[in-house]
């Protein structure tokens, strides 16, 4: 558990970075009682920090009050530097530029010795794009997030997995990243249901002046609402060793469930866009992995073997 001085400093950071700070959330975060949080807030108030406390709502700083920039620890600065490297490679150019501007402000708040430390550490962290990500992500993130905040409908040009192009009117709910892609979860006016869209398949985007037509559920409840007509279920049986060895690769291939069978083998359930891609991958592990369904995967594997010039 952190000491009282560190906890009060952390509470001050929360007040600066959030519109409302709830006592119950802070008590849970720092592992202390509500009474302790009340005392800490009173200490900040007695030190001259203008805090407003609304019963049943939480604490906030007086409107218009600004505190001097806080100093960052080396560990916090390195965490920011790591995030910068990731964002540069895995988000669009516009979003990356905004984050870089924010990082410049963070560097400006550091002491000279810490600035040098951060500069020297820069070359020790590298993030590389997966070869499967294709071209750079178009500048979509800020437009999507702004539309969510303003509750405005967005219009996109979209190309699905079958290369069919369409124009969609969407009510965006949120964005998610699942290696190696970014996805948009949204209410689709064309399909009249929630769908998930790959951002790299959106060729054009604009915000309309029309408001959302409904109140949307939390993003977490929508994850997995992909284009179901394009996904196919594949069930494999494999060994525990292969399951562990290829754990990361399995999720990339579309693994959604694993369970141990009575004989000690592992049953894996995949949802995939391409039976051929999965079939080729299974073929590389044919001595340890068996296709249970669908039969089309076995046919694909047999055809690949037949075409080999041995």
Image (cartoon, rainbow, N blue to C red):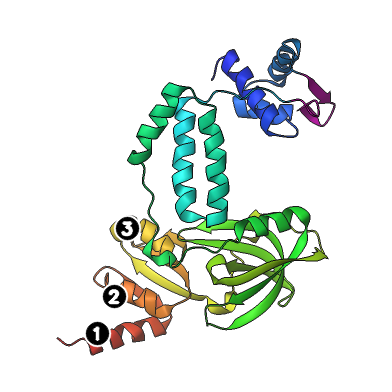
Quick check: can you spot residue 261? no
Q: Is residue 189 magenta?
A: no
State the mark number for residue 305: 1
Q: Please provide percent x and percent y for residue 140.
A: 60, 61
Query: Position of 85 compared to 173: left or right?
Result: left
Looking at the image, is mark 2 or mark 3 nearer the viewer?
2
In this view, the residue farthest toward the right is 55
Element on which disc 2 rests: helix
Image quadrant assignment for residue 193: bottom right
How far apart marks 2 and 3 lie (CA) works out to 18 Å
Query: Distance between the Cα atoms at labels 2 and 1?
Result: 9 Å
Return the residue at label 3.
240
Q: Would residue 190 be found to the left or right of residue 140 on screen?
A: right
Q: Are marks 2 and 3 in contact (CB under 8 Å)?
A: no
Residue appearing at x 44%, y 34% in the figure = 78
- Which element is circle 3 on? helix
Q: Is residue 249 above or below residue 192?
A: above
Mark 2 or mark 1: name the one nearer the start of the chain.
2
Contact? badges 2 and 1 (CB < 8 Å): yes
Disc 2 marks which residue? 283
Q: Which residues are magenta?
A: 50-65
Q: Residue 63 colored magenta?
A: yes
**Which is more N-terminal, label 3 or label 2?**
3
Residue 253: x percent and y percent? 42, 67
Question: Image quadrant for the N terminus?
Answer: top right
- Asked whether 300 or 157 is in front, the reply is 157
């Amino acid at each position: 558990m952190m000491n009282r001085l560190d906890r009060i400093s952390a509470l001050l950071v929360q007040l600066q970075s959030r519109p409302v700070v709830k006592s119950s959330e802070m008590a849970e975060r720092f592992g202390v009682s509500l009474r302790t949080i009340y005392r800490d807030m009173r200490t900040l108030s007695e030190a001259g920090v203008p805090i407003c406390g609304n019963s049943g709502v939480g604490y906030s700083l007086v409107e218009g009050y600004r505190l001097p920039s806080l100093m960052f620890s080396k560990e916090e600065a390195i965490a920011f530097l790591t995030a910068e490297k990731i964002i540069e490679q895995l988000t669009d150019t516009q979003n990356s530029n905004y984050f870089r501007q924010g990082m410049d402000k963070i560097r400006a708040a550091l002491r000279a010795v810490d600035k040098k430390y951060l500069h020297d550490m820069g070359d020790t962290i590298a993030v590389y794009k997966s070869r499967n990500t294709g071209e750079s992500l178009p500048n979509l993130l800020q437009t999507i997030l702004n539309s969510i905040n303003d509750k405005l409908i967005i219009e996109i040009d979209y190309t699905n997995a079958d290369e069919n192009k369409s124009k969609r009117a969407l009510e965006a709910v949120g964005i998610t990243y699942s290696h190696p892609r970014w996805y948009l979860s949204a209410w689709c006016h064309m399909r009249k249901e929630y769908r998930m869209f790959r951002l790299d398949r959106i060729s054009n985007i604009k915000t309309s002046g029309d408001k959302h037509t409904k109140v949307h559920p939390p993003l977490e409840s929508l994850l997995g609402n992909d284009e179901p007509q394009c996904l196919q279920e594949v069930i494999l049986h494999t060994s525990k060793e292969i399951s562990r060895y290829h754990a990361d690769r399995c999720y990339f291939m579309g693994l959604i469930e694993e369970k141990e069978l009575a004989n000690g083998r592992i049953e894996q359930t995949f949802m995939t866009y391409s039976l051929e891609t999965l079939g080729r991958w299974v073929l590389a592990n044919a001595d340890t992995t068996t296709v249970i369904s669908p039969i089309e995967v076995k046919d694909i594997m047999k055809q690949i073997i037949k075409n080999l010039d041995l």
